[in-house]
Amino acid sequence: MNNIKQTNATRWYARLGLIVFLFFAAFTAQSAQKKIVTKPKSYPTLADAYKALAKEQANQAAGIVADVPGKKTAPAAKPQQVAKYTQTEALMSLPFIQDLIKKNYPNYLKYSNIIDACKAREKQFKDGYYVFYHAYDNQWRVPQDLYKQLYVYYHPTADIPDTFTFLRFIEQSTPKAQAFLIEEIKKYGLINDNDPHRMLLLSTNLALFGNVGYANECTWTYFIESTSHADVNREIYERILDTYSLTYQYISEFTKLEKLLEKASKEQTLLQVFIPINRVDEVAYLSWVRGIPAHEKTIDLVLKGIPTKQEELFRKVAPALDKLGQIYQAQQEKHPIFKDLMESIKKGAFSVNAFLKIYRNTPEKLEEINDFSARLLLSKDYLLSPLADVKMYRYVTTPSPTLKEYYATLNDLVNKIVKEKEERPVTVEPLEVKPLNKAELEKKFGEVAAVYGEVSKDRQELQTLRDTYIKEYSQKGMQGNCMQITGKITQATMTYINKRIAETVKKVGPAPTKFSVFTMGSMARDESGFYTDLEIGILVAKKDPAILTYFRKFSQELADRFFKLGEHPDVGGKGLRVDEEDNAPDHLRWYARYASPEEIALLSKTFGPDTSKSPQEGSRIFVATPQEFARYLEPNAVKNLVGATGREQDIVSGISALVRNMRHLYGDKALFDQYMKEREVYLKGPSQTKSSHYTNRREEIAYQSLEGDVRKHDKADSPITLGKLGDTIDPKRKLYRFPEQVLTNLGFWYNVGVQNTVQIADKLVATKHMSPEWGNALKDLMNFTMCLRLRKQMTLGKQGFAIPVTQKGYNDLKREFTNDLDMATRNLASAKNKKDQKAITQAEDDVLHAQVSIKDLDNMIPGKADSIISPEIIKLLNTKYLPLEKKLLGTVQKFLAGDKNAFLGTDIGIPAR
């Protein structure tokens, strides 16, 4: 919500750049009652889902404020200093704001229960989160609630907060805020949150009464009366129902529910969104009208010659923005103000974090504090994900009887549409397979024969390697020294890979410069399992177009060779392959390896941000000189990139976490050693942000990574927080990863000189940063979780994810995968009928993955002695290892709070194995 106050407004934009520079340099509320409702647990069946939701809905109807689970979680980010005010307190502390509120909303105190609830939540989350306010018409609650209930039913194992609200009903991705602004402004000239950016942006105020006095821009106005810019239409319901292949039969009933809510109260729906302080600049930016960045010179151009009267101002500013956007789009950097805008974005001039640091401490110094808003990016990777570390609360005044009727009717309708699907007969035409004629067969045979010997040899040698260590593991199983075994697996796998790299160099030809292939992740730690991916990068002595062309060809050949092993996710595998995401030199996916540049561009446009379908894998970032790759660690490295895409900027932003685990794999080791020396300049240098918790860049990287681990696991339903198992568990991501990351980060913080987690524990004990008790406990934990990882891989023949612990967990996964297969099969039939090649490709991939998931599940039946998680292992996890991880979580939180002696404790309180 923005206002366009011309007098004084432009003076603020000049100050904004200075403020940012100085900063970086130096209940759902239904009534007055406030009882707390704890979060319902998982929903195994539709009946159970509604039984759990019914309690929440009944409480809402009775005027009870729905809240997050009873346990208080740690802040997402420790504040660099404790803010004096919450955002709403800051704004309302100013006398002129108080006067404006009384003048424009004389009856505002009649909503004191809602105002007080909003303030209380701001205070509760003040130290770790920023808050944003948005309001919308009540009719939109119907598709929101419908989509959420369907999501809960079809994703029974997902941990969905009760208060989460879906703000869009499609999956869409966006880059981070800075990259988004750069890319979209280059493309369109300016941002326009009406079109084309309506679906991507949410307009918000920075406080409950932000922009008070400007009716079109203040959230409170949109709350107390209907001022919707868009109505719910049939297409929205169809889109939601199509997501799960459900009938349209009851759409008219949903529109009746809209009318029910509309008539029940003249007040609309108020939304309160909390975003972690250390994530806010990834998903938000300071904005002006229609979502353009709050750029002084651009705003001056728009306002030039426009009357100061508000009603004329709003009417005339839109065409002025349209015209200026066309000029910017055509002239780009040739236009001096466009160039200044782009430079301002790259410098972080529209940082919400920087602005709110001032806002929450000295609001009286901001003369135009009432003139600003923020836009939030709506992406499936964050604000559209119920699994993200964001908190949302809706506030309404709908009477209790209406709420009871609304929820009862909605539940009944959802029951009907789900039941209709489950009773619907499934008839799917078999996939058409066209046989090859003789000439084609002979040609294909010749092509296959040329590589068959190589592929067969590669597969046999890899299987022999695995069989050797599977046999060694099987001798003692969960009682063995699995960290020692995985060290042997790693060395043998590196030898296997080095041989293929050498043969690839021979095939491609001598490299035009010296180079070092390095590896990251588990291989760098000597902790690879039987099945692992290959995260690699290449350091080169120098870079020029010819060198880059050579290594693109080299990377392609290497990726193709490993793809032929048949363990890539594209063919249903999860084994040895060059990393299919970002952590490898850039190369093309198997299906696109012969595509022309024009075809690659077309495919990239067709599949958009969906990296699982994109023709490209890896990134240009991972071919660099030692000096260049070291510079990625300097503070604000992203701002110094030239010609980087938004995706590449994201990779560089996260590269500091990757390079905690690195080792030379093949080639000129001197280059790798040079990189390790070069990077120390940045790691010993100043941190990116000032904090009393760390003194240099190395410590900052470790600290922020530990913070992220705490956010990830400190959740009410997390087995680490609970200290016991739930219905499903991912041995790698939930059990092994947390202690591994803690040891990796502590080893990196103290620069102990080793990367294997067991060796790190020994070094920390030797240097008196950790007590022997903690060291031994963590070594035992790492060995146990590694044994469990190997047991899982041995059983499934691949890497994997969550596995069932209980029969309920098995049933939930079976239902989820069966629904996925049903939906994918229907989508495939529909796509073939429409002859939509993009949709066919997507559906074929979805069918394959659902089939593989169901097949894998057959090997995960719980409750037996030979189950991956056997009854004996369950007992050990619940009585020893998960209580230890819970203790570890608390100790990490103490460390982050400033207690550097947190790991010197001797009373671990965990029984011996």
Image: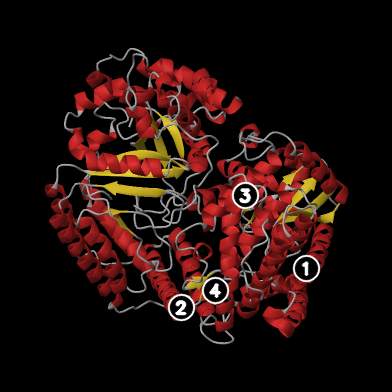
Viewer-side label of 4, 1? 4
The type of residue carrying mark 3 is Phe
Please state if 598 lies on the left or on the right of 424 as rendered. right
- First in residue order: circle 4 vs circle 1: 1
Disc 4 and disc 3 in contact, CB within 8 angstroms? no
Foreground mark, 1 or 3? 3
Density class for disc 2 (Cα within 10 Å; few <14, some 14-19, many ≥20) is many
Identify residue for label 4: 878
Q: Earlier in the sequence, mark 1 or mark 3?
A: 1
Q: Which residue is mark 3?
A: 895
Is residue 45 shown above or below 653? below
In the image, what residue type sits under mark 4? Asn
For marks 2 and 3, the one nearer the N-term is 2
Contact? badges 2 and 1 (CB < 8 Å): no
The CA distance from mark 2 to mark 3 is 37 Å
Lower sequence index among marks 4 and 3? 4
**Circle 2 sits in a helix, a strand or a loop, which is it?**
helix
Element class at badge 3: helix
Residues under numbered marks 1 and 3 in contact, where contact means CB atoms less than 8 Å apart: no
The residue mark sitting in front, 2 or 3, is 3
Q: Secondary structure at mark 4?
A: helix
Residue 471 position within the rendered picture, expressed as x and y whole percent measured from the top left:
74, 83
Residue 867 placement: quadrant:
bottom right
Mark number for residue 810? 2
> Which residue type carries mark 1?
Gly
Task: Work out which quarter of the rendered image holds the N terminus and state it.
Answer: top left
Write down the quadrant of residue 205 in the picture. top left
Q: With 184 as the anchor, is 240 left or right in this view?
A: left
- The residue labelled by disc 1 is 487
| Spatial CA span between label 2 and label 1 | 33 Å
Q: Tell me: residue 179, above or below residue 322.
A: below
